[in-house]
Image: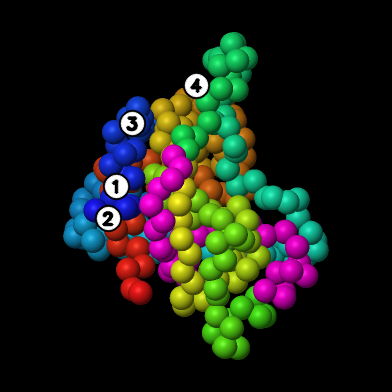
């Protein structure tokens, strides 16, 4: 059985999220999101075509985030490491949850020991938060098919997770060399872990500027607006039970 199909089946079995729609879609002024939202309402593409369109739109959104991180790193020399794109714990409204133990209890569901799945980060939506300008320049200039030194996956160095349901790859180690791999035509890695953010959709939405609790209270501003856009695309993906990764797994030997 396809391993990605398998872990999507696992999530559908254990997830309690109904992907509640608190979002005011008119506030999200993003052409990628708006196109996907309209396509869900008036489907003109086949499922395969639609999945590929979402994947490419998410990749463009991730590349804009990566461009922001690269530009900031080059300008400042260093960024705080690691750059936090998503909170470790699920944000809670302190006014709605007076019990402090419960307030800090919830965090993204993490499933381990997923069968190793090969994906090409040169094609799929990927984020690799970098922070050191010198290391970035060195890896970008050295890791390239142009110089006969293509990206090579190092299991002890390149550690990444799939973030579900928006289905993007996020690196937590080996970030500078993996950043170089994002811009290569072929850069295969193996994923063995997935973090499920589905429970967030029960209480959290992005208003186009910041993340809010369903009561309306501001929770946090993302480091880049596209983080929120990707999050809301994930709501649509989960709501309509779309499975993207069947179309982007690297099956070649």
Find numbered disc 4 in the image and state the secondary structure of the residue it sits on.
loop
How packed is label 1: few (under 14 Cα within 10 Å), some, or many (20 or more)? few
Q: Which of marks 2 and 4 is nearer the N terminus?
A: 2
User: Residue 32, how many percent across, how many down?
Assistant: 41, 57
The residue to which callout 2 is attached is 2
The residue to which callout 4 is attached is 215
Residue positioned 58% across, 19% down in the render: 103
Find numbered disc 1 in the image and state the secondary structure of the residue it sits on.
helix
Q: Distance of mark 2 from mark 3, alpha carbons?
A: 19 Å
Q: Which label is found at residue 14? A: 3
Magenta-drawn stretch contains 131: yes
The residue to which callout 1 is attached is 6
Q: How many numbered callouts? A: 4
Q: Furthest-right residue in view?
A: 77
User: Residue 53, how many percent across, how many down?
Assistant: 33, 62
User: Residue 243, how many percent across, how many down?
Assistant: 29, 51
Q: Magenta segment range?
A: 111-139
- Callouts 2 and 3 close, C-beta under 8 Å: no
User: Residue 84, how many percent across, how many down?
Assistant: 64, 46
How packed is label 2: few (under 14 Cα within 10 Å), some, or many (20 or more)? few
Find numbered disc 3 in the image and state the secondary structure of the residue it sits on.
helix
- Callouts 2 and 1 close, C-beta under 8 Å: yes
Q: Distance of mark 3 from mark 4, alpha carbons?
A: 26 Å
- Callouts 2 and 4 close, C-beta under 8 Å: no
Q: Earlier in the sequence, mark 3 or mark 4?
A: 3
What colour scheme does the image use? rainbow
Is residue 64 at all visible to an observer of this figure? no
């Amino acid at each position: 059985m396809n391993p990605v199909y398998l872990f999507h089946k696992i999530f559908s079995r254990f997830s309690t999220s109904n992907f509640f729609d608190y979002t005011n879609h008119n506030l999200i002024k993003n052409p990628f999101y708006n196109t996907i939202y309209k396509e869900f309402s008036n489907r003109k593409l086949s499922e395969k075509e639609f999945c590929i369109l979402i994947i490419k739109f998410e990749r463009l959104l991730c590349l804009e985030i990566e461009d922001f991180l690269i530009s900031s790193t080059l300008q400042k020399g260093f960024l705080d490491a690691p750059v936090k794109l998503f909170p470790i714990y699920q944000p809670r409204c302190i006014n709605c949850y007076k019990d402090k133990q419960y307030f800090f209890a919830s965090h993204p569901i993490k499933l381990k020991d997923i069968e190793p799945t090969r994906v090409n980060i040169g094609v799929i939506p990927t984020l690799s938060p970098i922070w050191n300008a010198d290391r970035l320049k060195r890896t970008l200039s050295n890791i390239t098919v142009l110089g006969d030194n293509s990206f090579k996956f190092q299991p002890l160095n390149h550690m990444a997770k799939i973030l579900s349901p928006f289905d993007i790859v996020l690196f937590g180690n080996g970030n500078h060399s993996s950043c170089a791999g994002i811009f290569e035509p072929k850069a295969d890695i193996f994923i063995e872990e997935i973090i499920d953010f589905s429970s967030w959709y029960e209480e959290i939405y992005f208003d186009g500027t910041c993340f809010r609790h369903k009561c309306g209270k501001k929770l946090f501003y993302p480091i880049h607006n596209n983080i929120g856009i990707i999050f809301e695309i994930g709501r649509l993906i989960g709501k309509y039970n779309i499975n993207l990764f069947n179309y982007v797994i690297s099956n070649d030997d």
